[in-house]
Image (spheres, rainbow, N blue to C red):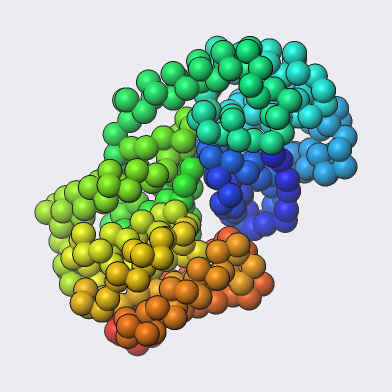
Amino acid sequence: MIVSCRVHFLLFVVKNELRWYRDTLVVLIVDEACFVLYGVRMSDAKEFFKESEPLFQFYREGKYEDALVVVEKLTAEFPTYAARTYFWQICLLAMAGRQEWALHVFEEALSNGIWWSEGQLRSDSDLASLQNGPEFEHLVAISKEKHRQAQAASTPDLFVHVPNGKGPFSLLMALHARGSSPDLDVHFWKSAVKFGWMLAMPQSSQMASPLAYLWDDREKSFSELAEHVHVLVEKYPIDVNRIVIAGFSQGAARAMQVVMNGLVNVRGFFAVVPGMIEGDELNSWSNSTGTWNVLVSGGRDSRHDFFQQVKESFEKKRIPLMFKNYPEMAHDFPNDFDDVLQQGLNFILNEETE
């Protein structure tokens, strides 16, 4: 499904999760996976989405053939974004009633090494006219196998940004969202380095699509995160009493879980519009972990009621929580996030903001 909105820089989307960066009109593909701008210059990203703007308008108006003209031009001019533009083409062709050509483009994408998760291909409503057809099912099976092979070779990774000085350093470990990567998310968290914090960005071993990662398998995620903390403490001069686990969306939910379930010994969590956590798990948490925590909430986020539930639960149990709500914000980072990050980190450490 393709929709558009005005956001801050660059948006990418995972299943029912919206992610955006700064100052451009971008597209949402509401599904399981997303196509990320990994290893590309931000100027290229801005140019790509600027050139994409007519597509979004045409899509909203149901002018799928006109949108296809834009996509075909983008495919030729921006080969780095082939996974994204190929998927847009398939969706638009299907919506335009050109199912045979949509299947041809799907086959071409697979031959060029592009694949998408089975969940995305089966759940996207723009592909409804293709789904369950024998040729589509054949191509889905090929994509699924490519996904399996890529997943088999995938390993967790860790990207570390060290501040000036000799330490010991406070450590902020920030988890990417579902369908994202450290390369994208670092732009939100990097101001922590200016505050004198070491910033570590783990990359999950679980793949959503080429160069897009997720934290769906919670036990595997917890294991990888605990190992990352152990390695960081062993390798770098880190103050073990000043470690914070953070994240956005699904990454934020995993940060909350790994901290509140006592799987890592850290100071607290910093969660930005976290993904859902089951009520039984939330209710099992107590102040026995001794953590101080931050939750950034969006009043227009579909999970706003859940954010309020966390706030009320923590208040009832007297678990320290800085709750920062933005009534007009949806599933996003706030515009003043650098300031909020500094305030929140100082709250977790029980220090005054300078």
**Residue 237 visible in rendering:** yes
Residue drawn at (47%, 30%), measured in percent from left and top?
210
Q: Position of residue 113 (x, y in %)?
A: 51, 18
Quadrant, the N terminus: top right
Residue drawn at (75%, 15%), measured in percent from left and top?
101
Quadrant, the C terminus: bottom left
Instruction: Compare residues 280 and 41 and report the one nearer the observer.
Output: 280
Left or right? Give the position of 263 relative to 176.
Answer: left
**Residue 247 visible in rendering:** no
Instruction: Establish if 9 lies above or below 134.
Output: below
Residue drawn at (73%, 48%), measured in percent from left and top?
4
Left or right? Give the position of 253 relative to 348.
Answer: right
Q: Quarter of the image holding residue 125?
A: top right
Residue drawn at (45%, 19%), measured in percent from left and top?
146
Q: Position of residue 206 (x, y in %)?
A: 37, 37
Instruction: Establish if 144 lies above or below 168.
Output: above
Count all numbered tags in the image, as a single digit: 0
Q: Quarter of the image holding residue 172?
A: bottom left
Left or right? Give the position of 204 relative to 140.
Answer: left
Instruction: Compare residues 97 and 332 and report the one nearer the observer.
Output: 97
Q: Position of residue 300 (x, y in %)?
A: 64, 67
